[in-house]
Image (cartoon, grey):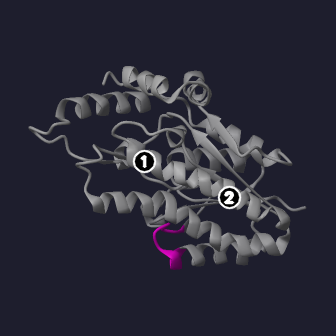
Amino acid sequence: MDKKVVLITGGSSGIGKSIGTFLTEKGFTVYGTTRNPKNYPNFDAFDLVQLDVKDVESIQKAVSEVIAKEGRLDVLINNAGVGITGPIEETPHEEILNVFDTNFHGPIHVMKAVLPQMRKQGSGLIINVTSIAGYMGLPYRGFYSATKGALGLITEALRMEVKEFGVKVTNVAPGDFVTNIAAGRYHAPVLDGSAYEDKYAQTLDAINNDVDTGGNPIQVAEKVFAIIQQNNPKVHNPVGAFMQKFSLKLKSLLPDKVYEKLLLNHYKL
């Protein structure tokens, strides 16, 4: 068979670019997406196409463009996403809607766009990039956790629905990696006199430090490559520092209140 054709949303920077570059070096035909390719005039790691996950028309156009050029689409990597932090009580609702549109509704729209081609081929692989944060409700990151947790559940359901068509669905859940996500993340402001002022500011510093000292995103690219090689990928594929992955095991073993206490101690709350 010809080289596998891969479409990566959010492919112009961060984890998406690392995955695309790695897969290109491995011989895949890679298309990355970005909302505005004109912002990357010197980008030459792989082809970039215009796609905004909040714009269904742009999704359909991008997917059709790739299929028209290549005649097939073998792998979708739903990577585009945004971060958000803030107290649940004080986060503006329009920002809550935006993060769900980007991190949850967007990937669903992209999956809907590629599935007809994959069913026609009788093969395909969808990898949803979720997060280790999606397995637990984290303080001051509740909405981010909720979007990634919801996408993880959709992954579980869709996997069973499309199995008969030869389409495989899985997720890769990164921990903290050094990327530019903090620059694009929405931070609810630390409000003077707020009941959450001190604890939120303290937690925000800890979150940013975790990203700044995170791992190399090439680890995520290597995990994605390994998943593509598998005949029957697992449902969940966490990748990150040992303690971040181990925290998932602890959550499954410990009583809820004990695990909550560990999180409270970690964030000094």
For the residue pair 65 and 261, the one nearer the viewer reads as 261
Residue 37 vs 11, above or below: the answer is: below
* In this picture, residue 9 sits left or right of residue 199: right
Within 10 angstroms of label 1, few (less than 14), some, or many (20 or more) residues? many
Tell me if I can see residue 3 in this picture.
Answer: yes
| The N terminus, quarter of image | bottom right
Closer to the observer: label 1 or label 2?
A: 2
Could you tell which of marks 1 and 2 lies nearer the N-terminus? 1
Q: Position of residue 22 (x, y in %)?
A: 67, 44
For the residue pair 3 and 52, the one nearer the viewer reads as 52
* In this picture, residue 179 sits left or right of residue 74: left
Amino acid found under the numbered disc labelled 2: Ala
Within 10 angstroms of label 2, few (less than 14), some, or many (20 or more) residues? few
- Secondary structure found at label 1: helix
Amino acid found under the numbered disc labelled 1: Tyr
Residue 25 vs 7, above or below: the answer is: above
For the residue pair 84 and 19, the one nearer the viewer reads as 84
Residue at image point 45% right, 27% down:
257
- Secondary structure found at label 2: helix
* In this picture, residue 193 sits left or right of residue 261: left
Please provide the residue range marked out in magenta. Answer: 50-58
> What residue did someone put label 1 on?
144
Residue at image point 46% right, 65% down:
35
Residue at image point 13% right, 39% down:
194
Residue at image point 54% right, 40% down:
135
> What residue did someone put label 2 on?
157
Q: Return the residue found at the far left.
A: 193
Q: Position of residue 237 (x, y in %)?
A: 68, 40
